[in-house]
Image: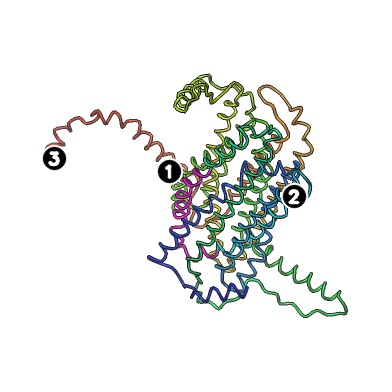
Amino acid sequence: MMSWRSKTYDELPALAIRGPGLRRALRVATVAWMYGIVWMTCTTGAPLMQFCQMVGFSQFAFGLLSAIPFIATLGQLVAAVIIDRTGLAKYQFLQCFTVSRLLWLAIAAIPLLLPTPSAPAVAAMLLIYGASYFLAAMGMPASLTWFSAMIPRRIRGRYFARRWLMARPIQIIAVIVLWVVLDWATEHNAAYLPPHLRGRVLWTISAIFAVAAVFGTADILLFKRIREVVRTNDKPFHPSIEFNLPPPVGDGMVRYVAYAISCCRLALRQLLIDPLGDRVFRHYVLYGATLAFAIAVSGPFFYLNALYNLGFSLGITQFLFMIVSPAIGLIGVRQWGKLIDRWGRRPVLIVGSAGTWLSILPWFFARHDTPAPQFVFDAANYLSSHIGALFGSPDFVALPPGTPVGAFLLALLPALFGGIAWTGIMLGQNNVLLGFADGQGRSKYIAASSVLISFGGIAGGLVGGLVAQKLQYLQAVPLEFGIFRWNQWHATFVISLVGRMFALMWLLNMPDPGASRTREMLRYVMTAAYNNLTYIAFTPLRAIGWGRGERPRGDRDA
């Protein structure tokens, strides 16, 4: 802590960053996230699920993996105390996140040091993964406190929208590279790998994790170029976390144990219980916890269902979740930012949360043998044969019989709806947290919200893992009725859908000062969409002169 303080003051913290200095800092933060999104792309999704499957994860271990990021948020309590005592954030952010990203080198080394699949490899993966997320959680309050002090409130929605917009093309390029590499390693078949390919696939994913660690570390180190910002306050400073307890009394170790328990109880009351007195905070936490439960209960099982039930390759799965959704999110990200700045955070969160219902429903209909239009096969194979002829392979067939094209077309629908809806939720939640960071005891509110929300994520991960483990027999004998064929993973999808519906209820009465009604925002959006569609539809007619008749004589004479 003292090292962070001394390093920060050696660089002369700024009271505020404005003008050219602010624009420079925002550019650095945007470029840094272009490196960071490569790290995020390589360490999530299909490569992570395949790696865990190959080191020996059970269904319950996958549920635990989903819960770990939420368990790790307990580190934010420690971070909140440090920030509250020092008032500084920069080097806490730098050191915690740097070590967190470098730990992915240790994850990449697991196949080198431990036999796979094996229980020690599973334990090592869970421990290192948890340590990485714990350190990232320690850095999160520092990053939000720093950004809150640096970025003016009036441009936050648009800035973060533009930041994501600039990084999305980099993510798409990274996913395409991963697609090519993973499909080469698995020979387009991730579900049934022959023994001679297992080693190649495992080492390929380990190399991906190592590259991700380098890009992730570069993301954090770029922030050294931005100055620390210390807010000024006319009121005298009072720490929001106090430990005013009488000295321990009694004899032996018992008094120290009792004193430690009293300190922990006091800290938990100040850090977690007191913030719940704020109505905005309370409603947001209940919303976030319910949504976190819905996300965690089914999180890894979407990937497993795509890989091992629908028969998608690793590359196709990564393309579906990490290209289609982000690319569609690009369409609405700037509009979401403008809507937040104009209409408030609550209407955006309500609309986005309702949109997530549509992002889960098509998964109940998709199955490996879902029929697809024949023209899709004909067009794809026609193009592949002509392209293959240019490289000396005129018999190349892109979509042989049995390819799950119908399932893929159905899976595109949740990717489309989810890409738009989750982008709005992400921006809305980020602005809510920045609003908490503006108030007294700002780091405490950030940490408390994350920790309380994490209880929902922990419960969701454990419930999802237990349900998938108990119903694993459905993998061999799925439930079939009509067009549906459901296994244990679909049970987690049902629970997730119910959780998403309940999450919306907490938003309806959440106070949001300055926010407009959701109905007014929807009316504005629908009117703007209608006008834009009308303009596009009649543009060809305008091009040929329709509607350009002469004005009435009275108009000409006027």
Which amino acid type corresponds to the residue marked 1 in the rendered image?
Tyr
Instruction: Give the structural element (helix, strand or loop) at label 2.
Output: loop
Q: Nearer the viewer, mark 3 or mark 2?
A: 2
Q: Quadrant of the N terminus?
A: bottom right
Residue nearest the viewer, comparing 203 with 374: 203
Tell me the quarter of the picture where residue 299 sits. Answer: top right
Which of the numbered marks, if any, corresponds to residue 524?
1
Instruction: Work out whether 521 lies above or below 247.
Output: above
Neighbour class for label 2 at 10 Å: few (<14), some, many (≥20)?
Answer: some
Which of the numbered marks, if any, corresponds to residue 114?
2
The answer to whether residue 221 is left or right of residue 529 is right
- What secondary structure do most residues of the magenta stretch adopt? helix
> CA gap, disc 1 to disc 3?
35 Å
Tell me the quarter of the picture where residue 307 sits. Answer: top right
The region drawn magenta spans 145-174
Residue nearest the viewer, comparing 455 with 287: 455
Instruction: Give the structural element (helix, strand or loop) at label 3.
Output: loop
The answer to whether residue 182 is left or right of residue 308 is left
Which of the numbered marks, if any, corresponds to residue 558?
3
Instruction: Work out whether 24 lies above or below 368.
Output: below
User: Where does residue 473 sit, x and y in percent of width and height?
Assistant: 78, 32
Instruction: Give the structural element (helix, strand or loop) at label 1.
Output: helix
